[in-house]
């Protein structure tokens, strides 16, 4: 694997639209959350956290788990050891502070949830200084130890995503 594996068209478009509208409409979102290794806040929701004992058992968690399985089918290096599932949303010009997702030897899987996106809205992700365009139905896979950050959109639309931290396969 290079530093970043990119998978496009993870779900059929009609499934993505249904899942997006279901997740956006579900009352799991909060406006102020602390990220594990940083001091900044992220609007969203932790759906599952193995270490903190969070397991919402919500529709959003079910759909996020299904999306992870679809991603996992397309690569041979992702384990079933999910440490965390986090929903996130960025508003207009709300850029991340650059951060890492875990100090453990894990992968981050970032899935872009919006079914419709215009390239001029931005919303890109930088991973170890590499710029990756926000594109609907795209998954990025990279080491959780890599410095990264997402850029807020230049539009009135929220940039939504699902962030997974997963353990590595053991040999």
Image: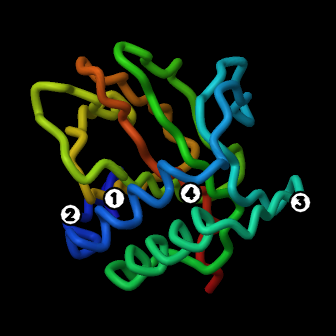
Could you classify mark 1 by the number of other residues whose Cα lies within 10 Å: few (under 14), some (14-19), or many (20 or more)?
Answer: many
Q: Secondary structure at mark 3?
A: loop
First in sequence: mark 4 or mark 1? 1
Task: Report the residue marked by disc 1.
Answer: 139
First in sequence: mark 1 or mark 2? 2
Q: Residue at x 48, y 72 (%)?
A: 68
First in sequence: mark 3 or mark 1? 3
Distance from label 1 to label 2 (Cα)?
6 Å
Task: Report the residue marked by disc 2.
Answer: 8
Q: Which mark is residue 9?
A: none
Q: Residue at x 22, y 75 (%)?
A: 12
Say which of 124 and 119 sits in front.
119
Q: Quadrant of residue 48?
A: bottom right
- In the rendered image of this protein, does residue 132 appear above or below residue 51? above
Q: Secondary structure at mark 1?
A: strand
Distance from label 3 to label 4 (Cα)?
15 Å
Q: Which mark is residue 53?
A: 3
Left or right? Give the position of 126 relative to 28. left
Say which of 99 and 59 sits in front.
59
- In the rendered image of this protein, does residue 166 appear above or below residue 104? below
Could you classify mark 4 by the number of other residues whose Cα lies within 10 Å: few (under 14), some (14-19), or many (20 or more)?
Answer: many
Q: Residue at x 69, y 56 (%)?
A: 47
First in sequence: mark 2 or mark 3? 2
| Quadrant containing the N terminus in the rendered view | bottom left
Distance from label 4 to label 2 (Cα)?
17 Å
Left or right? Give the position of 151 relative to 144. left
Q: Are marks 3 and 1 in contact (CB under 8 Å)?
A: no
Could you classify mark 3 by the number of other residues whose Cα lies within 10 Å: few (under 14), some (14-19), or many (20 or more)?
Answer: few
Q: Which mark is residue 164?
A: 4
Residue 118 screen position, x and y as percent: 12, 36
Residue 10 screen position, x and y as percent: 28, 70
């Amino acid at each position: 694997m290079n530093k970043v594996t990119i998978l496009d068209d993870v779900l059929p478009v009609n499934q993505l639209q249904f899942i997006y509208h279901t997740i956006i409409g579900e009352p799991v979102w909060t406006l102020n959350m602390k990220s594990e290794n940083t001091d900044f806040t992220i609007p969203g929701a932790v759906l599952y956290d193995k270490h903190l004992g969070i397991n919402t058992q919500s529709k959003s968690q079910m759909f996020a788990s299904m999306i992870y399985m679809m991603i996992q089918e397309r690569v041979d290096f992702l384990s079933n050891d999910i440490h965390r599932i986090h929903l996130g949303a960025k508003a207009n010009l709300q850029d991340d502070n650059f951060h890492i997702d875990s100090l453990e030897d894990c992968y981050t899987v970032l899935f872009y949830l919006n079914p419709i996106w215009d390239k001029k809205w931005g919303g890109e992700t930088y991973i170890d200084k590499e710029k990756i365009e926000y594109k609907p139905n795209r998954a990025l896979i990279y080491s959780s130890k890599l410095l990264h950050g997402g850029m807020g959109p230049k539009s009135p639309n929220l940039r939504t995503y699902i962030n997974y931290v997963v353990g590595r396969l053991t040999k």
